[in-house]
Amino acid sequence: MLKRIVASVMLFSSMMANAAVDIQPNTLYPKVEFDTTMGKVVVELDRTRAPITVDNFLTYVVQGDYDNTLFHRVIADFVVQGGGLNPQLEEGPSMDPIVNESGNGLSNSVGTIAMARDNDPHSATRQFYFNVGDNKNLNPSKRRWGYAVFGEVIEGMAVLEAMSYTPTMTNPELNWPDFPVKEIKLNKATLLPQ
C-alpha cells in the first residue's frame, strides 16, 4: 500500500511539473472564483496542508475542465457537489486518482471545499463538494480514511446555502438522487491572479 502511495505521489509530482507554471506553484493560498448560475463563490485553497489535492484541482481549473459543468448533488445542511457532469449529463475526462490527504488537520466544517471520492480512499479525481453543514462524520478517524478538505469559502457562502435548498429529484437518466430539478451550472472556474 505504501509503495502504491509513493508511486502515485511521484507520478503526480512529475505530471504537475509540466503544469506548474499555470497553477501558481509558489502561491501557498491560491484563490479560485466560481461563476455559477446562482452567483459567485470564491475559495482560498491551502497548499500547505493539501498540496497534491490543490495542484490536482487547479490543473482542472486552468484547463477549463470545470467550465460549463453541473452541480449534480445538493443536500440542505450537508453538501453541494459538482465538477463531474456537463449539461448533457456526460462525465468529463479525468486524470489519474490522487492520494487521499484527509489527515491534513483540515475539517469538513461549514464553508470548506473537499474532494469527492468513491469507497476507495484514493479514488478522488475531479469532483469536489462544498460543506454547507458541519460534517465531522466525513473526517478521518483511527479506523477509516476521510474526505480531503483543501480550502475554504471566502466569498459567496450565501450562494452555496441557496443552492443547497433548491428542490431535488432522482434524475431519471442517471438514477442519481439529490439532483437539482432546475439546472445549477458552474459557468466558469477561474484561478485568480496572485
Image (cartoon, rainbow, N blue to C red):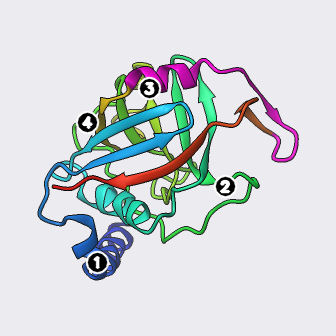
Label 4 – label 1 distance at C-alpha: 23 Å
Tags 4 and 1 touching, CB below 8 Å: no
Question: Counting residues from the N terminus, which is met first, the one under dot 2 or under dot 4?
Answer: 2
Front position in the image: 45 or 193: 193
Residue pointed to by mark 2: 86
Label 2 – label 3 distance at C-alpha: 29 Å
Label 1 – label 3 distance at C-alpha: 30 Å
Amino acid type, label 2: Asn
Which x, y percent locates residue 181? 76, 29
Please name which of the two marks, 3 or 4, marks the residue nearer to the observer: 4
Secondary structure state at the residue bearing disc 3: helix
Q: Does 172 appear in magenta?
A: yes
Which x, y percent locates residue 189? 43, 52
Tags 3 and 4 touching, CB below 8 Å: no
Q: Residues within 10 Å of mark 2 (few under 14, many from 20)?
A: many
Label 2 – label 1 distance at C-alpha: 31 Å
Residue pointed to by mark 4: 106
Question: Counting residues from the N terminus, which is met first, the one under dot 2 or under dot 1?
Answer: 1
Residue pointed to by mark 3: 137
Location of the C terminus (image quadrant): bottom left
Q: Does 18 appear in magenta?
A: no
Question: Counting residues from the N terminus, which is met first, the one under dot 3 or under dot 4?
Answer: 4
Label 3 – label 4 distance at C-alpha: 13 Å
Please name which of the two marks, 2 or 4, marks the residue nearer to the observer: 2
Amino acid type, label 4: Leu
Residue at horizontal 52 percent and vertical 51 percent from the top: 127
Question: Counting residues from the N terminus, which is met first, the one under dot 1 or under dot 3?
Answer: 1
Residue 141: in sight, yes or no?
Answer: yes
Range shown magenta:
157-175
Label 2 – label 4 distance at C-alpha: 30 Å
Residue at horizontal 30 percent and vertical 76 percent from the top: 19
Residue pointed to by mark 1: 10
